[in-house]
C-alpha cells in the first residue's frame, strides 16, 4: 500500500513538473485548443446530422447537454478504469461540483444559446474571445489569485487583436457593434461565466481533485441543459450512425480538453493558461475551412497575421509566468 502511494505521489509530481514547464504547458494547452477548435465545424456538421435548425435554441441546448453528459460519463469511466477505483465524489466535493457546473457548463452554455439567436455572429465571436481577458481580470481583482501587471494586459490585448482580425477581417468597416440585452447581453453573461469558471477551477483544485470536478460537473451541467432543452420543446433526430459517432467525438473533445485544461489551471496561474485560449478561434477558423470547405473565407495573410498576434500575446504573458512560476504569482502565495 505504501509502495502504491509512493508511486502515485511520484507520478503526480512528474505530471506537475511537465504541466508547469514552458513546453509542457504549451503542448497541453495547444492540444486542448486544437480539440476545441475542431468543435466549431463539428457543431455545424452535427446540427445537420441531427436535423437542428439554426434558430432552434431548445434543440441546440438539448444537443449540447447530451454532449456534456456523455463527456462526464467518459471522464468518470476512464479514470475509474485506469485508477482501478471508482471516481465517486465525497460529500465534501458536492458543493464544489455544483458551483463549477453552474458556471462552467450550465451558465456558460445556457446564456450562450439563449443569446446566439438574437446576436450578430461576428460580434458574438469577439465577445466570446474576451473571456480570456476577463479571466485574468477576475483572477487578479476579484479572486486575488495573482497580480495584474502591464505585461499581462499587453499580452491579452495582442491575443484579442488576433481574434478580432481572424473573425472580422475585411468586414471591419461594415461591422455594427450593436448591443441588445437578449442578444449580446446574454453572450456577455456566458463569457463572464466562462471566465469565472477558470478562476474557480484554480481555487477549488487546491482542495478537490480537478479531474473529479471536471467529470461530475459535466454530468450535472449537462443534465441541466438537457432539462432546459426538453422543457423548450427541443428534439434530436439523428440521421444515422454517423450522427452518433460525431456526438461521441464531440463528447470526447469536452472530456479530454476540459480535463487537461483543469489540470493546467490547478498548477499554473490563470493568466499563464487563459492566454492560450486565444488560439481557439484561430484553430476553429482554419479547421472550418478544411472540414466545411470554406476556403473562400481564408485569407492567408490575415490568418498568418492573426496567428502572429496570438503567439506574441502568449509569449508576453508567459515571460511573466516563466519568471514568477505557477501559483506563486498570486498575492500572499508565500504563506501557502
Image (spheres, rainbow, N blue to C red):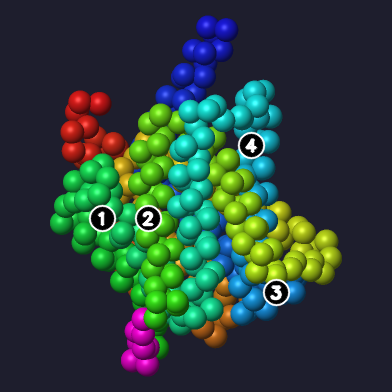
Q: Position of residue 201 (x, y in %)?
A: 41, 42
> Callout 3: helix, strand or loop?
loop
Q: Residues within 10 Å of mark 4 (few under 14, many from 20)?
A: many
Mark 4 or 1 closer to N-term? 4
Residue on which the image places disc 1: 137
Find out whether the residues at labels 2 and 1 contact each other: C-beta distance under 8 Å: yes
Mark 3 or 4 closer to N-term? 3
Looking at the image, residue 178 sits to the left or right of residue 58; the answer is: left
Say above or below: 175 vs 301.
Answer: below
Q: Magenta stretch mostly in which secondary structure?
A: loop
User: Cα distance, mark 3 to mark 1?
Assistant: 36 Å
Mark 3 or 1 closer to N-term? 3
Residue on which the image places disc 4: 76
Q: Which residues are magenta?
A: 172-179
Q: Quadrant of residue 315?
A: bottom left
Please report the residue visible at 29 percent of the width from the left and 37 percent of the height from the top.
Answer: 326
User: Cα distance, mark 3 to mark 2?
Assistant: 28 Å
> Callout 2: helix, strand or loop?
helix
Mark 4 or 2 closer to N-term? 4
Say above or below: 4 vs 218.
Answer: above
Say above or below: 194 vs 264.
Answer: below
Give the camera-side residue of 135 and 149. 135
Q: Residues within 10 Å of mark 1 (few under 14, many from 20)?
A: many
Q: Residue furthest right?
A: 240
Mark 2 or 1 closer to N-term? 1
> Callout 1: helix, strand or loop?
helix
Say above or below: 315 vs 61.
Answer: above
Residue on which the image places disc 2: 195
Find out whether the residues at labels 3 and 1 contact each other: C-beta distance under 8 Å: no
Residue on which the image places disc 3: 52
Quadrant holding the N terminus: top right
User: Cα distance, mark 4 to mark 1?
Assistant: 32 Å
Amino acid at each position: 500500500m505504501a509502495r502504491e502511494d509512493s508511486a502515485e505521489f511520484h507520478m503526480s509530481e512528474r505530471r506537475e513538473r511537465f504541466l508547469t514547464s514552458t513546453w509542457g504547458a504549451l503542448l497541453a494547452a495547444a492540444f486542448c485548443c486544437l480539440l476545441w477548435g475542431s468543435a466549431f465545424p463539428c457543431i455545424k456538421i452535427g446540427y445537420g446530422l441531427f436535423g437542428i435548425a439554426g434558430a432552434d435554441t431548445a434543440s441546440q441546448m438539448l444537443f449540447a447537454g447530451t454532449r456534456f453528459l456523455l463527456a462526464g460519463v467518459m471522464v468518470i469511466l476512464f479514470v475509474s478504469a485506469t485508477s482501478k477505483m471508482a471516481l465517486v465524489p465525497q460529500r465534501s466535493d458536492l458543493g464544489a461540483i455544483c458551483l463549477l457546473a453552474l458556471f462552467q457548463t450550465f451558465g456558460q452554455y445556457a446564456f450562450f444559446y439563449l443569446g446566439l439567436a438574437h446576436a450578430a455572429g461576428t460580434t458574438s465571436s469577439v465577445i466570446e474571445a474576451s473571456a480570456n481577458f476577463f479571466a485574468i481580470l477576475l483572477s487578479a481583482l476579484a479572486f486575488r489569485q495573482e497580480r495584474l501587471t502591464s505585461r499581462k494586459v499587453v499580452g491579452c490585448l495582442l491575443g484579442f487583436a488576433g481574434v478580432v482580425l481572424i473573425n472580422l477581417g475585411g468586414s471591419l468597416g461594415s461591422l455594427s457593434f450593436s448591443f441588445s440585452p437578449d442578444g449580446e447581453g446574454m453572450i456577455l453573461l456566458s463569457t463572464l461565466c466562462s471566465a469565472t469558471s477558470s478562476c474557480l477551477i484554480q481555487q477549488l483544485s487546491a482542495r478537490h481533485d480537478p479531474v473529479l470536478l471536471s467529470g461530475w460537473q459535466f454530468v450535472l451541467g449537462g443534465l441541466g441543459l438537457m432539462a432546459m432543452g426538453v422543457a423548450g420543446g427541443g428534439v434530436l433526430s439523428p440521421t444515422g450512425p454517423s450522427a452518433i459517432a460525431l456526438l461521441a467525438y464531440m463528447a470526447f473533445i469536452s472530456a479530454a480538453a476540459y480535463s487537461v485544461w483543469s489540470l493546467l489551471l490547478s498548477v499554473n496561474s490563470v493568466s499563464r493558461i487563459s492566454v492560450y485560449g486565444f488560439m481557439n478561434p484561430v484553430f476553429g477558423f482554419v479547421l472550418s475551412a478544411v472540414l466545411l470547405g470554406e476556403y473562400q473565407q481564408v485569407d492567408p495573410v490575415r490568418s498568418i497575421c492573426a496567428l502572429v498576434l496570438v503567439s506574441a500575446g502568449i509569449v508576453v504573458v508567459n515571460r511573466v509566468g516563466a519568471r514568477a512560476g505557477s501559483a506563486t504569482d498570486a498575492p500572499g502565495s508565500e504563506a501557502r
